[in-house]
Image (cartoon, rainbow, N blue to C red):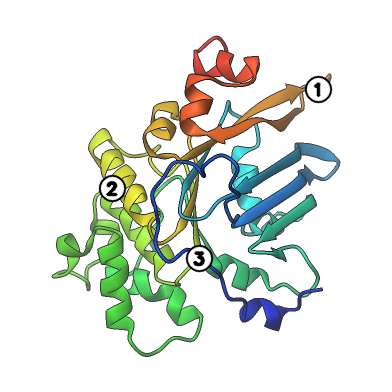
């Protein structure tokens, strides 16, 4: 059983270079960052999500799509234990991250969230300077030296450095919506995560800002594994290497329980889905 110290010292094996290929050649197994086995999430006695099994590979963008209430965001939050913050939430099944059970006794959820960062639906910069936004996580983790370098590196990776390098002391709230979202991405990057989770990161942005974030995702996957929830199927088609389609069962009392219908390379899922329910959703027959 893994204790907090062992998790803290966990080393993550990554390929030396990111290939950018959409899928692993037939017959070859890709190493997985996450292995989900029979994952379900309950809020009290209500099952919000049930029996999800899938493997998420490194250095790719994996998209979660499906209608409202199908458990996409709920599943995303299981990947860095944010459901722990909901008193009634309970996770069943196994969530294995780089060979280690994230929900084993002794695992530190704070360390989990450092390694697996989150970017939310609406840009949420702190009411602090741009500089202080970026270094918030490192400072929280006890980092006191090299903060200037951390800020510059994170903002460069978030494609924001050239726009803000001369106004790092200004409030992050003064930036445009798209810039604020890239600042939040830089804030997530600053803690040196292995994975970046994004929960509909472009839903509050205009098309130009959305395009910048999508370009950024394609660049960031060279260094990070990205899992994104999106309601926009065109966005999934543009940025994702693999896509998971979720649907929902409605119970007699109107309760909605999400379920995984299909998970495959994005090209295959959108052009020749294996399940009729997937095809009906993609072609707009239901949604």
Q: Which residue is mark 3?
A: 14
**In the visual, does 194 lie left or right of 10?**
left
Residue 160's place in the image compared with 4, above or below, is above
Residue at the extreme right of the image, as rendered:
45
Q: Secondary structure at mark 1?
A: loop
Taking the spot 43% from the left edge, 66% from the top edge, the residue there is: 16
Residue, disc 1: 251
Q: CA distance from mark 2 to mark 1?
A: 39 Å
- Residue 121 at what x, y percent from top left? 46, 45
Mark 2–mark 3 distance (CA, rounded to whole Å): 30 Å
Toward which corner of the image does residue 124 lie, by quadrant?
bottom left
Residue 251 x/y as whole percent: 81, 22
The residue wearing badge 2 is: 178
Q: Earlier in the sequence, mark 2 or mark 1?
A: 2
Q: Quadrant of the C terminus?
A: top right
Local SS, label 3: loop
């Amino acid at each position: 059983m893994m204790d907090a110290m062992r998790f803290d010292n966990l080393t993550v094996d990554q390929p030396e270079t990111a290939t950018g290929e959409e899928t692993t050649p037939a017959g070859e197994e890709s190493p997985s960052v996450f292995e989900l086995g029979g994952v379900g999430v309950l809020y009290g006695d209500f099952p919000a999500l049930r029996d999800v099994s899938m493997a998420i590979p490194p250095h790719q963008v994996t998209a979660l799509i499906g209608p409202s209430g199908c458990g996409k965001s709920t599943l995303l939050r299981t990947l860095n234990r944010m459901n722990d913050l909901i008193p009634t939430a309970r996770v069943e099944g196994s969530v294995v991250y780089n060979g280690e059970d994230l929900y084993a006794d002794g695992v530190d959820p704070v360390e989990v969230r450092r390694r697996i960062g989150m970017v939310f639906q609406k840009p949420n910069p702190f009411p602090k300077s741009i500089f202080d936004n970026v270094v918030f996580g490192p400072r929280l983790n006890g980092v006191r030296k090299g903060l200037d370098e951390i800020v510059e590196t994170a903002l460069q990776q978030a494609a924001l450095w050239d726009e803000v390098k001369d106004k790092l002391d200004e409030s992050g709230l003064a930036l445009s919506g798209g810039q604020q979202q890239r600042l939040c991405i830089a804030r997530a990057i600053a803690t040196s995560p292995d994975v970046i989770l994004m929960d509909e990161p472009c839903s509050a942005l205009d098309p130009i800002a959305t395009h910048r974030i999508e370009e950024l995702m394609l660049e960031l996957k060279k260094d990070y594994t990205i899992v994104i929830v999106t309601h926009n199927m065109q966005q999934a088609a543009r940025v994702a290497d693999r896509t998971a389609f979720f649907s929902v069962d409605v119970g007699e009392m109107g309760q909605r329980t999400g379920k995984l219908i299909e998970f495959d390379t994005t090209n295959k899922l959108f052009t020749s889905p294996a399940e009729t329910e997937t095809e009906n959703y993609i072609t707009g027959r239901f949604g």
